[in-house]
Amino acid sequence: MSASLRDGIDELTVRRRVIAAIAAAAAAAVPGVDRVGRGGPRALAWLAGTPVSARVIEDRVHVRLWLIARQGEPLAELSARARTTIGRAMEQQLGLRLGDVTVLVDGVGG
């Protein structure tokens, strides 16, 4: 699945994995994020599936992302900063309209 963006006569097609990679990079850059991923032992993380999913519905991008917070970080504030940063990245880098960004804090790093 991909998103097609039209601007006049130009068209850009972006795969979901590109959208997910941009979302992961944006989240990883947020102060207080230890890493993008699922909680639990890292060796078993692959069983839980990908920590970032993206879908495009009616020309809007929807992102769901799991992250591990740094110790002592206020989680509500961290997830709000992550949502804002991810949303800004979608709009600025891809020109996609934002549907929603769901951030799931799945653990606290050491």
Image: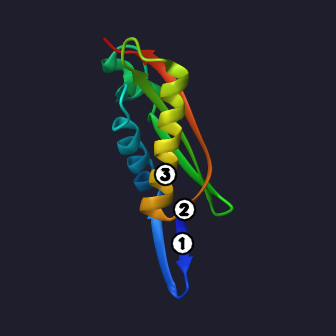
Number of numbered callouts drawn = 3
Q: Which residue is mark 2?
A: 96
Give the CA distance from mark 3 to mark 1: 17 Å
Is there a contact, CB below 8 Å, between mark 3 and mark 1? no
Judging from the image, what secondary structure is the residue with disc 3 in? helix
Give the CA distance from mark 3 to mark 2: 10 Å
| Residue mark closest to the camera, 3 vs 2 | 3
In the image, is residue 100 above or below residue 42?
A: below
Q: Which residue is mark 3?
A: 88
Q: Residue furthest bottom?
A: 9
Of callouts 3 and 2, which one flags the residue occurring earlier in the amino acid sequence? 3
Residue 23 placed where, x, y %? Answer: 43, 46
The C terminus - image quarter: top left
In the image, is residue 54 above or below residue 97?
A: above
Q: Which residue is mark 1?
A: 5
Q: Amino acid at mark 1?
A: Leu
The residue lying at 40 percent from left, 28 percent from top is: 37
Judging from the image, what secondary structure is the residue with disc 1 in? strand
Give the CA distance from mark 1 to mark 2: 7 Å
Q: Amino acid at mark 3?
A: Arg
The residue lying at 46 percent from left, 26 percent from top is: 48
Quarter-of-image position of residue 98: bottom right
Q: Amino acid at mark 2?
A: Leu
Say which of 78 and 62 sits in front: 78
Of callouts 3 and 1, which one flags the residue occurring earlier in the amino acid sequence? 1
For residue 93, side relative to residue 99 (left or right): left
